[in-house]
Amino acid sequence: MNALNLQPSIFDIISLSKKENIIYAKAKILADSDIYKAHFPGNPITPGVCQLQLVKDCVKTAYQTKNLIFKSSKFVKFVNILKPTEHQEIDIEISVNEENGLLELDAKIFDNDTIFLKARLNYTLSA
């Protein structure tokens, strides 16, 4: 596993589109990932940091950049537990407000009516 990019080992982004200032994505959870063997054996739960990385990876893909640097968060709320045994595919919706290289994100990870993550995050795009 590459420590700088968790997405390929736990999620597979199967679709992604950007319309105006909103990124829409769908990801498949790779339930056989080694992360789930440790977090937690017999009761796998998707780590919050992996969900945040998925948001970042979606933004990097939509903006076609590798240079996205975390600056701050206004809030991060894990609303429900994301279990790969119960949710094989999830949706990601990210509203982006871009100003002078600063991206203000309102992100949500969900499956139908079940919300797993709500977050307001700030990143910078660098050359």
Image: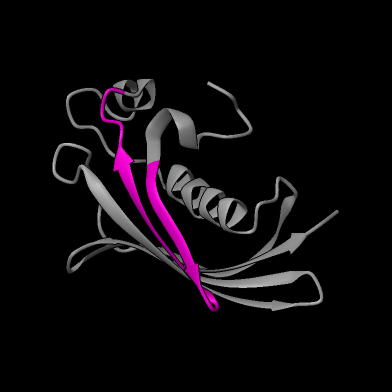
Q: Which sits in the foreground, 93 or 113?
A: 93
| Magenta stretch bounds | 13-32
Give x and y (percent) for residue 89.
24, 47
The residue drawn where x is 65% and y is 52% is: 64
Tell me which colouring the rendered structure shows: one colour
Vertical position of residue 72 compared to residue 69: above or below = below
Dominant secondary structure of the residues highlighted in magenta in the image? strand
Instruction: Tell me if residue 96 comes above or below residue 33 in the rendering.
Output: below
The answer to whether residue 82 is visible is: no
66 displayed left or right of 84: right
Q: Quadrant of residue 3?
A: top right
Residue 57 on the magenta segment: no
Q: Position of residue 51 (x, y in %)?
A: 43, 49
- In this image, 13 relative to 97: left or right? left
Residue 2 lies, in percent from the top left, at 58, 24
Identify the residue at horizontal 30%, vertical 31% (top origin): 30
User: Quick check: is 16 in the magenta stretch?
Assistant: yes
| Residue 11 locus on image (x, y percent) | 38, 38
* 15 relative to 101 in the view: left or right: left
Q: How many marks?
A: 0
Q: Is residue 10 visible?
A: yes
In the image, 127 versus 20, the foreground residue is 20
Residue 100 position (above or below residue 88): below
Which residue shows up at 86% across the image and 53% down it? 127
| Residue 99: quadrant of the picture | bottom right
Rendered residue at 27%/23% (across/down): 32
